[in-house]
Image (tube, rainbow, N blue to C red):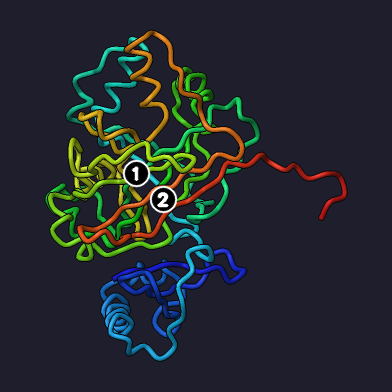
């Protein structure tokens, strides 16, 4: 099943069911008006949404309309939690090596994770707004999951049962702000602005054989200013699967329905597959020559993030964002 949230002038938008080919949609208001409503009672709402999904795919839905990703908010425009991991530990090792930092052995056994802002999540076509190019604007192409309720202490082997939906994410980073924040010893905050998400979220069964071991075994395709820069396989070199990331959170707390958990930047040891964030490219340059040459994003730059099935069809729709300056309000402006 594929779900999206359309703009309607409210904070949380309108839930729609989207056809498998992303061509048509149907309002789910007779079942659940908001995605969070569906997640709060998933065993009740999911079968009804799936019935509508089947009717839509078979051309039987009476009020279907053309699906337009430009009209999409994030599937969850605001979430109870956005927790982003760093499951591709080879990426962490590379970035640390570039700055001459040792890799603690625990990083291979204990997931890294930070708590991001979840009150302002961006739709797939929303601009990346930044006050200064000097902040070091970087995209980060990731996979993410949306959970149901997960009780504290749930072991990893049971956490997969609580994954409701999968989606793509662009976890924007402001690289030049990160060192100062980490030096304070309290982690990311200003260096992690609003995150963008794919227009569509899908249930795990939509991925077929590509969804196994709590990982998505498909390439994640990234274009920067129209040029393909990365196509790593999201299932390869993922040290921690999503059940392990969720279990990391539940060690000390309950996880509420509507929580989003990210994989961190997708990265492969095979560097010929390119990169999913500029920082990785710059790290390779730093290791090779002692100086990075690839710049971070500038105003007007675009990034496109998409994943395709084995038949070449888009699974989640594309994240396609443009970097723009912050337009500050003038005195007396509405």
In the drawing, what numbered circle is on residue 142?
1
Q: Residue at x 39, y 8 (%)?
A: 290
Camera-nearest residue between 334 and 280 = 280
**In whole angstroms, how far apart are the C-alphas of marks 1 and 2?**
17 Å
User: Above or below — where is 6 with respect to 31?
Assistant: above
Quadrant of the image containing the N terminus = bottom left
Picture quadrant of residue 328: top right
Tell me if 24 is positioned left or right of 73 in this view: left
User: Above or below — where is 218 with respect to 67?
Assistant: above
Q: Residue at x 30, y 26 (%)?
A: 92
Q: Can you give x and y, in whole percent of width and height, for residue 229 in the image?
A: 37, 36
In the drawing, what numbered circle is on residue 81?
2
Q: Residue at x 40, y 91 (%)?
A: 62
Q: Can you give x and y, in whole percent of width and height, for residue 308 in the image?
A: 28, 56
Tell me if 322 is positioned left or right of 142 in this view: right
In the drawing, what numbered circle is on residue 206?
none
Q: Residues within 10 Å of mark 2 (few under 14, many from 20)?
A: many
Question: Looking at the image, how many numbered discs can be counted on the residues?
Answer: 2
């Amino acid at each position: 099943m594929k779900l999206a949230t359309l703009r309607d002038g409210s904070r949380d938008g309108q839930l729609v069911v989207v056809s498998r080919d992303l061509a048509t949609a149907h309002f789910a208001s007779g079942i659940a008006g908001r995605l969070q409503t569906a997640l709060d009672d998933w065993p009740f709402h999911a079968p009804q949404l799936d019935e509508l999904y089947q009717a839509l795919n078979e051309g039987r839905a009476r009020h279907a309309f053309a699906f337009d990703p430009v009209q999409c908010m994030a599937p969850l425009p605001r979430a109870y939690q956005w927790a982003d991991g760093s499951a591709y530990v080879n990426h962490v090792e590379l970035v640390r090596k570039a700055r001459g930092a040792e890799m603690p052995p625990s990083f291979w056994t204990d997931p890294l994770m930070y708590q991001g802002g979840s009150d302002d999540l961006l739709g797939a076509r929303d601009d990346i707004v930044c006050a200064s190019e000097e902040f070091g604007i970087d995209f980060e192409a990731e996979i993410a999951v949306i959970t149901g309720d997960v009780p504290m202490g749930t072991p990893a082997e049971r956490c997969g049962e609580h994954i409701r939906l999968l989606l793509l994410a662009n976890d924007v980073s402001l690289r030049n702000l990160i060192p100062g924040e980490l030096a304070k010893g309290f982690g990311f905050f200003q260096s992690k602005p609003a995150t963008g998400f794919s227009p569509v979220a899908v249930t795990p069964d939509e991925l077929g054989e590509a969804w196994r071991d709590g990982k998505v075994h498909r390439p994640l395709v990234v274009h920067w200013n129209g040029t393909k820069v990365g196509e790593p396989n999201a299932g390869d070199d993922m040290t921690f699967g999503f059940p392990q990331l969720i279990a990391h959170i539940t060690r000390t707390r309950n996880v509420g329905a509507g929580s989003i958990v990210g994989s961190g930047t997708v990265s492969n040891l095979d560097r010929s597959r390119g990169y999913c964030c500029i920082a990785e490219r710059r790290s390779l340059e730093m290791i090779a020559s002692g100086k990075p040459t690839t710049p971070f994003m500038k105003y007007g730059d675009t990034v496109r993030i998409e994943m395709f099935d084995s038949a070449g069809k888009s699974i989640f729709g594309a994240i396609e964002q443009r970097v723009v300056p912050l337009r500050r309000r003038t005195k007396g402006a509405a």
